Amino acid sequence: MLEACEAGVDECVLKPIHPLLFEAKIKAWLRRACGYARSAQGWKFPSDPFGSGLGAWQKQPIHLTNLELRLLYYLMGRPGRTVSTEELCRRVWGHGAGGDVATLKNLVYRLRPKIEAEPAHLHYVHTVVSVGYQFIAN
């Protein structure tokens, strides 16, 4: 774990983890990343960081895999910045843990329909050809 922290990891989840603790960690990450807050009605975004697309999300839950969540979280933390494919592979899979450009491309392909209101018109995760990906909040 020390090695991971020295490599830049600021949060680590050790397995096995109780589901309620894991849920609490996710809510804390969302609060820090995009203003997710608790209200009397439950957990909601106080503002819409995704523009008009979030309204469609609130009607049904989005089921993301662990890798999809890591990718989205990392990109959302750098809105408007182009993140190289190499950096994303390191951050999503970890150092030397099997992520490559083709696997990343497939992960983005699976993530987009889950977060886009209209998958044919990309609003959030943009490809920067021969470089990487970018998250555009609005």
Image (cartoon, helix red, strand yellow):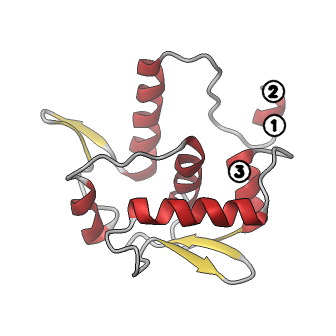
Above or below 82: residue 43: above
Q: Are marks 2 and 1 in contact (CB under 8 Å)?
A: yes
Q: Position of residue 111 (x, y in %)?
A: 50, 60
Residue, x 28% and y 56% (percent of image)?
57
| Snapshot quadrant of residue 75 | bottom right
Residue, x 70% and y 39% (percent of image)?
9
How far apart marks 2 and 1 lie (CA) works out to 6 Å
Q: Position of residue 109 (x, y in %)?
A: 56, 66
| Residue holding disc 3 | 91
Horizontal side of 69 relative to 42 (left or right) equals right
Q: Position of residue 116 (x, y in %)?
A: 38, 68
Local crowd at mark 3 within 10 Å, few (<14), some, or many (≥20)?
some
Identify the mark nearer the N-term, 2 or 3. Answer: 2
Q: Position of residue 95 (x, y in %)?
A: 83, 45
Q: Secondary structure at mark 2?
A: helix
Residue, x 46% and y 73% (percent of image)?
136
Identify the mark nearer the N-term, 1 or 3. Answer: 1
Q: Which mark is residue 6?
A: 1
Q: Secondary structure at mark 3?
A: helix
| Residue holding disc 2 | 2
| Snapshot quadrant of residue 114 | bottom left
Amino acid on which disc 2 is placed: Leu
